Image (cartoon, grey):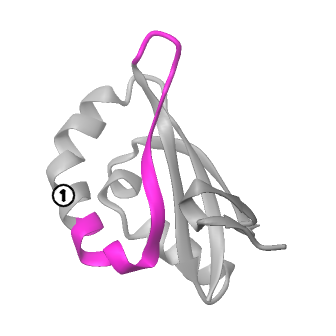
Amino acid sequence: MKHYAILCWDAPGSASFRAAARDAHFARIDMIIDSLAIAGPLKDASGAFAGSLVIVKAADEAGARAILEADPYFAAGVWERFEISEFVPAAGEWIGGKIW
């Protein structure tokens, strides 16, 4: 398994979509929790939701994209755009130090 960082930016005016899909989104997270290294919302300077950061464990980029596209926020149009990049956890508290 590899890690993939997915950065999603909310569409303008999507706060109501986010609120309406929140319960389904959380239910989906519960279903795939073992595929997540970490996930959570991004906020802007005013504290409003601006997007999401998800680091998933998947065999390839297509698998990471499938995880994203199955999310209720994706279907609800919360995210205007996203980027997926392979991510190598190399250092920090969350990985217990460093890899070198």
Identify the residue shown where x is 15% and y is 51%.
23
Q: Which of 18 and 4 is in front in this view?
A: 4
Q: In this view, does 16 lie above or below 36?
A: above
Q: In this view, does 62 lie above or below 9?
A: below
User: What's under tag 1, amino acid-wise?
Assistant: Ala
Identify the residue shown where x is 36% and y is 63%.
71
Quadrant location of the N terminus in the rendered image: bottom right
Circle 1 sits in a helix, a strand or a loop, which is it? helix
Does residue 86 belong to the magenta stretch? no
The x, y position of residue 27, in whole percent, is: 18, 64
Categorize mark 1 by other alpha carbons within 10 Å: few (<14), some (14-19), many (20+).
few
The x, y position of residue 10, in whole percent, is: 49, 35
Total tally of numbered discs in the picture: 1
Identify the residue shown where x is 40% and y is 42%.
78
**Quarter assignment of residue 61:** bottom right
Q: Which of 47 and 21 is in front in this view?
A: 47
The x, y position of residue 18, in whole percent, is: 29, 38
> Would residue 32 be found to the left or right of residue 41 on screen?
left
**Quarter assignment of residue 13:** top left
The x, y position of residue 54, in whole percent, is: 51, 57
**Quarter assignment of residue 84:** bottom right
- Looking at the rendering, the stretch of residues picked out in magenta corresponds to 28-47
> Would residue 98 be found to the left or right of residue 30 on screen?
right
Q: Mark 1 points at which residue?
A: 24
Q: Which of 94 and 14 is in front in this view?
A: 94
Q: Is residue 34 above or below residue 52?
A: below
> Would residue 17 be found to the left or right of residue 35 on screen?
left
Identify the residue shown where x is 24% and y is 76%.
31
